[in-house]
Image (tube, helix red, strand yellow):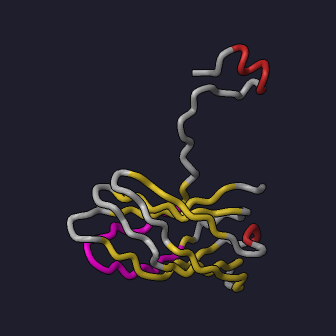
């Protein structure tokens, strides 16, 4: 559904009213995380040049305490560009939280290597995504 005529006139033809949330473009979903300590070592070969990225944590049925660290190393082909450490955000049950991350010259990268550990509480289910946003 398109926005109302007055909204389109005031804010442009693409304006939409009453948007509650817009999901970030997610490019990489980590493997299924099971209960206990999950060692993550994954490579995203489709990492498109961007100026900003977010790590999303979705706690499906139990609160996730957060505070764990993941290391993100970025490459252009086989050339190392830089890295950053991302601390996972606490997330309440049924919700998703994100934290922003950035590396100088990130827009020139095409590969991301993510390593670290995510601990999933007993009886819970957690999903972790790396979302990338376009040039700012």
Residue 66: quarter of image: bottom left
In the rendered view of the protein, which quadrant contains the N terminus?
top right
The magenta-colored residue range is 28-43
Which is nearer the eye, 73 or 90? Answer: 90
Q: Position of residue 71 (x, y in %)?
A: 55, 81
Q: Residue 126 versus residue 81: which sits nearer the camera?
A: 126
Query: Is 42 part of what is drawn in magenta?
Result: yes
As drawn, is 54 to the left or to the right of 82? left
- Name the residue: 38% across, 82% down: 39
Among the 4 quarters of the image, the one containing residue 81: bottom right
The location of residue 91, given as percent across then percent down, is 42, 60
Is residue 85 found inside the magenta-colored segment of the image? no
Q: Write the residue at 67% across / 79% down.
A: 75
6 on left or right of 131: right
96 relative to 86, above or below? above
Taking the spot 59% from the left edge, 62% from the top edge, the residue there is: 54
């Amino acid at each position: 559904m398109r926005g109302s005529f007055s909204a389109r006139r005031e804010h442009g033809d693409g304006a939409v009213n009453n948007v509650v949330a817009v999901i970030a473009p997610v490019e990489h979903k980590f493997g299924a995380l099971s209960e206990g300590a999950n060692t993550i070592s994954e490579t995203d070969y489709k990492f498109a040049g961007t100026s900003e990225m977010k790590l999303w944590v979705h706690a499906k049925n139990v609160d996730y305490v957060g505070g764990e660290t993941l290391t993100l190393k970025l490459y252009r082909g086989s050339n190392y560009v830089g890295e950053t450490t991302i601390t996972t955000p606490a997330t309440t049950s049924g919700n998703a939280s994100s934290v922003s991350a950035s590396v100088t010259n990130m827009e020139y990268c095409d590969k991301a290597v993510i390593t670290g550990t995510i601990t999933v509480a007993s009886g819970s289910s957690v999903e972790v995504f790396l979302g990338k946003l376009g040039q700012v």
